[in-house]
Image: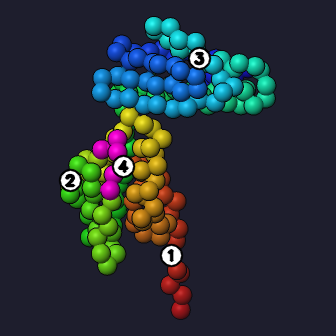
Amino acid sequence: MSRIGKLPIVLPKGVKVDWQAPVVKVTAGKTTLTRTIHSDIDLNLTAEKIEVKPKVLTARAKALWGLSRTLINNMVRGVSGGFSKTLEVIGVGWRVEQLNPKQLKLSLGFSHPVIFDLPEGVGAAVDAKTNKITITSADNELLGLTAARLRAYRRPEPYKGKGIKYEGERIARKVGKAGGK
């Protein structure tokens, strides 16, 4: 029995769920998220909650039960409140600018600035004083992928701590060369 899968998903006010097997569609206001759920999983919909159940208790269905529940829960949380991640750019002379709502200009010590196009459904806000990028989206998976793509331009390095890191991430620092005689 899945400890996560058996928990019901409580629907906030204004969130509508449409289940046309195997596609689940979650809508709130203008935001809509759609996902295909595996055929071994079934949903029981009521006005205030969703229950995720496996059709047959096979090993594969048990493995997908908690995953499917978490993915649907993230869809419900995303359309009702959204998700956000904050990235910090640390380095002398490194800057981030927002060219327009869908583009970021990153000056990261390369010979040229990097223009980063944000995917559809992802927004960003840049704080120029602290060099922080706050990325927001209703889709948690797309948000994490976008943050990882931004971070991949300059991963944090362990000697000086320069790079693009997640807010609150701890970088394991290393000692440099010993000044021998």
Spatial separation of the CA atoms under disc 2 and disc 4 = 13 Å
Q: Which amino acid does label 3 sit on?
A: Leu
- Camera sees residue 94: no
Spatial separation of the CA atoms under disc 3 and disc 2 = 41 Å
* Circle 2 crowding by C-alpha within 10 Å: few under 14, some 14–19, many from 20: few
**Residue sitting at x 35%, y 22%:** 28
Lower position in the chain sequence, tag 1 or tag 4: 4
- Quick one: SS at disc 3? strand
- Quick one: SS at disc 1? loop
Nearer the observer, 73 or 94: 73
Q: Which of marks 1 and 4 is in front?
A: 4
Q: Name the residue under label 1.
A: 176
Mark 3 and 1 residues: CB-CB less than 8 Å, in contact? Answer: no
Q: Give the range drawn in magenta.
A: 117-123
Spatial separation of the CA atoms under disc 3 and disc 4 = 30 Å
Nearer the observer, 79 or 83: 79
* Circle 3 crowding by C-alpha within 10 Å: few under 14, some 14–19, many from 20: some
Lower position in the chain sequence, tag 2 or tag 1: 2
Q: Which amino acid does label 1 sit on?
A: Gly
Q: Mark 2 points at which residue?
A: 100
Spatial separation of the CA atoms under disc 2 and disc 1 = 40 Å
Q: Is residue 43 left or right of residue 54?
A: left
Instruction: Return the x and y of residue 111 as percentages of the image width and height.
Output: 31, 79
**Residue sitting at x 45%, y 18%:** 17
Spatial separation of the CA atoms under disc 3 and disc 1 = 56 Å
- Quick one: SS at disc 4? loop
Q: What residue type is labelled 2?
A: Asn
Residue 119, numbered label: 4
Q: What residue type is labelled 4?
A: Pro
Residue 159, numbered label: none
Lower position in the chain sequence, tag 3 or tag 4: 3
